[in-house]
Image (tube, helix red, strand yellow):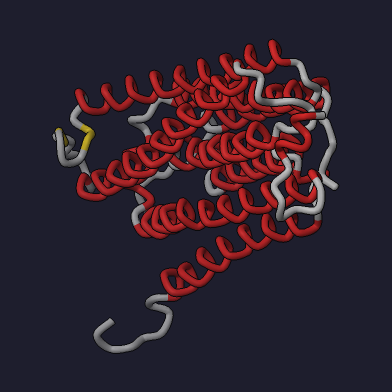
Amino acid sequence: MANHTLALRHQFDDVDQQKDASTFGMWLFLATEVLFFGGMFCCYTVYRSLYPAAFGAASNHLSVIWGGVSTAVLICSSYFMACSVNSAASGRKNALITYLVLTILFAATFLVIEMSEWHNLYTEGMMPGFNFTFHEGDFRHVQLFYCMYFSMTGLHASHVTVGIGILTVLLIRAARGVFSPQYHTPVEVSGLYWHFVDLVWIYLFPLYYLVARHVHAG
Amino acid sequence: MSEHIVTKKQYAHVFVILLILTLTTSWAAYFDLGKLNVVVALVIATIKASLVVLFFMHVYWQTKLTKLVVVSGVAWLALLLWLTLTDIVSRGWLPFPGK
């Protein structure tokens, strides 16, 4: 039980209390993240209610298929993260390492798909500030849609990138045999962050790729 | 007491449901349901989000304090959206000159 005593910091009564405190802290951070992204979702809601036709026209330039595929890829990544937590809690080191590698691979796949989508939009002239050549209908508000699309998916992609960094640190520590059934809080708490990133995408996908497709003028 | 090891089988069930819901929501987007498109997409997204929060993020088995943080995060987001939209939506309801 060397790990057990080593892992317990002196300010806590026992391991359970320490673990609950860590989980609570992570959830507090995630609540601030909800509001961080929430401000942008609020902005989206306001502009979509003001310019539904332009948002519909803009949304039709995004691919439902690739949006769906990246959603599925991110859900796979989230599932492997959940399996990592399960393996860490039951003390299976090799399974933990395998699942962490799978989680990172799927996260990287998500980023590759997203970057190729951004590249397509750039070459089609739909990237405000860099290359925007779309001049049909209410093109100014189409530009607004794409400003928000790139800001929100960009903020999300930066969260994915940070997540890959965190997962890599976990992987190195897992390979060194730091985690045990008594001490695996970092895996669990990082898992919370990772699922949150998935959660944001669960809303970004329908709001940008799906809901506005059939909005017509008027 | 938060120690509860969720089995791989439970995770796999949630995972399959999430994939089916992703397919459903993508498929539904191809039909013109009028205003219902938004409702269908957001209801499915919320079901998916709830599954992730409850089971992948273990909130179902967590302490009451953690559940309170989750609920308050959502409540503050609802306040933000609600108060902003009451302004945006109700503009122009009253015939003030110069509006």
Residue appearing at x 51%, y 63% in the figure: B81
B29 or A84, which lies in front? A84
Question: Quick check: A13 above or below B2?
Answer: below
Residue appearing at x 42%, y 44% in the figure: A215
Looking at the rendering, which quadrant does residue A196 occupy? top right
Looking at the rendering, which quadrant does residue A80 occupy? top right
Q: Which residue ends up furthest to the bottom in the rendered image? A: B97
Residue appearing at x 46%, y 55% in the figure: A36
Position of the N terminus of chain A, as image quadrant, is top right
Q: Is residue B18 visible?
A: yes
A110 sits left or right of B98 in the view: right
Q: Is residue A57 visible?
A: no
B23 or A167, which lies in front? A167
Q: Position of residue A69 (x, y in %)?
A: 51, 20
A78 or A207, which lies in front? A78
A52 sits left or right of A21 in the view: left
A20 or A102, which lies in front? A20
Q: Position of residue A168 (x, y in %)?
A: 50, 23
Q: Position of residue A129 (x, y in %)?
A: 16, 41
Residue appearing at x 18%, y 30% in the figure: A125
